[in-house]
Image: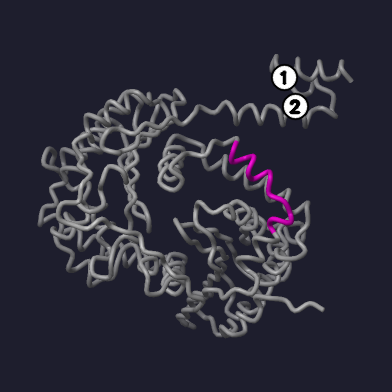
Amino acid sequence: MATRLFRLSSAIRNNKKLSNVPKQWRSTAAAVNYQQALVNVPPTRVTCIDNGLRVASEDSGAPTATVGLWIDAGSRYENARNNGVAHFLEHMAFKGTSKRSQTDLELEVENMGAHLNAYTSREQTVFYAKCLSNDVPKALEILSDIIQNSRLGEPEIERERGVILREMQEVETNLQEVVFDHLHATAYQGTALGRTILGPTENIKSISRQDLQDYISTHYKPPRIILSGAGGVRHEELVNHAKQLFGCLKNDYENCEIPLLEPCRFTGSEIRVRDDSMPLAHIAIAVEGCGWTSPDNIPLMVANTLIGAWDRSQGGGANNASHLAAASAESNLAHSFQSFNTCYKDTGLWGIYFVCEPMKCEDMLFNIQSEWMRLCSTITESEVARARNLLKTNMLLQLDGTTPICEDIGRQMLCYNRRIPLHELEARIECVTVQQVRDVCTKYIYDRCPAVAAVGPVENLPDYNRIRSSMYWLRL
């Protein structure tokens, strides 16, 4: 035994091929290498400058880098009157500053060979740049100019109204986006999370320059901004640049109230938009999940992975590991389905989106709810072990590149006030047991009122009371 252990450790140290190690030790050697790789990931360093802005970075020594500003401000911080202003600001960011015209800005970025982008979500606004590591200082200067000195000219504002209205028309053709907007509208009706990110048409037509300036002065404050960097970035240099470029940002509220995040109430309800001229039905059903910081989040992620995703192009039939995928393939229940776990600060949506033939809605929904009930009662150890491994694999694959790593740093800093190390996240996933999955699913799914959004030929979809009555099993 001692001799075999010595041979194993020698093979690992000398980075020999696993074929040199006896078969019974190969899985152990791979596990050791995997754990070492997680622990040896470059650390995420965090520094808070004087005005409260935080700098977080991971230096991998890569020849390229991604740097960006993650701002704790999105459509959730809007009201009914100015809904859409955060997304409007995202569009205006690249339309020129007091230092650069739009043409100068575009030429400077192109001459660097860089990529400048932005997006708005319900809780965050993001501006980021991908560039060569040597160009990080110039990219940071451009980002600081964009968020501090945007010109917000009236001609540009008027021009962007038309652009955003056309974007809204394009979104209407993406049925998955339409269904998820309807799902939020019914699940969080009467609250900020129920509004769309783009806002209603009448708001886009009436948003003024003053609305944009008010949103910036209210929400673009240093403690709510993360300067995130990944790839070939040096943390000390990022901190020095942050002090020079963002040190003048003020952390006071002279003419406005400090914004408070109001809780968003979940309501079990439904929205149906029946259109029999459409070839397929697009349906989402969800229960209220948990927020980012809840201890139930990891078990719910494992449960979400157990349901998984599938579409016809994958095939597999009865050999699919996912029970729902096997049933969908064998009985031709759906064209595709995708389980989701959407988290916000204090709430979330846990559910599934599927596309099916007009007269398959009821059968598909029956199989989904049966699978949900099975998660609460008879899920097995082998299934949970598979889901844990798949979840860990998916998380690592999502961090392939400087941009996803930079995004992960920025998002986690806003959600957790720290970045969870990979080895800690892996350990937390590995600790999830069958009983934990059952308990958490019972807590969030069993006998809970769901939110339902359906678009298309949905005549075959059962009425809400029948859907609600299938959210529990009566067992003798």
Q: Nearer the viewer, residue 13 or 94?
A: 13
- Residue found 79% across the figure and 28% down from its top: 26
Which residue corresponds to mark 2? 29
Above or below residue 334? Residue 319 is: above
Instruction: Please tell me whether the stretch drawn in magenta is mainly helix, strand or loop.
Output: helix
Which quadrant holds the C terminus?
bottom right
Decide: few, some or many residues near mark 2? Use Cα within 10 Å; few <14, some 14-19, many ≥20: some
Above or below residue 366? Residue 253 is: above
Q: Secondary structure at mark 2?
A: helix
Q: Are marks 1 and 2 in contact (CB under 8 Å)?
A: yes
Q: Secondary structure at mark 1?
A: helix
Q: Earlier in the sequence, mark 1 or mark 2?
A: 1
- Residue found 72% across the figure and 19% down from its top: 12
Is residue 470 one of those drawn in magenta? no
Decide: few, some or many residues near mark 1? Use Cα within 10 Å; few <14, some 14-19, many ≥20: some
The amino acid marked with disc number 1 is Ile
The amino acid marked with disc number 2 is Ala
Which quadrant holds the N terminus?
top right
Which residue corresponds to mark 1? 12
- Span colored in magenta: 424-437
Q: How many marks?
A: 2
Where residue 33 appears, as percent x and y from the top left, is: 68, 27
Q: Nearer the viewer, residue 264 or 387?
A: 264
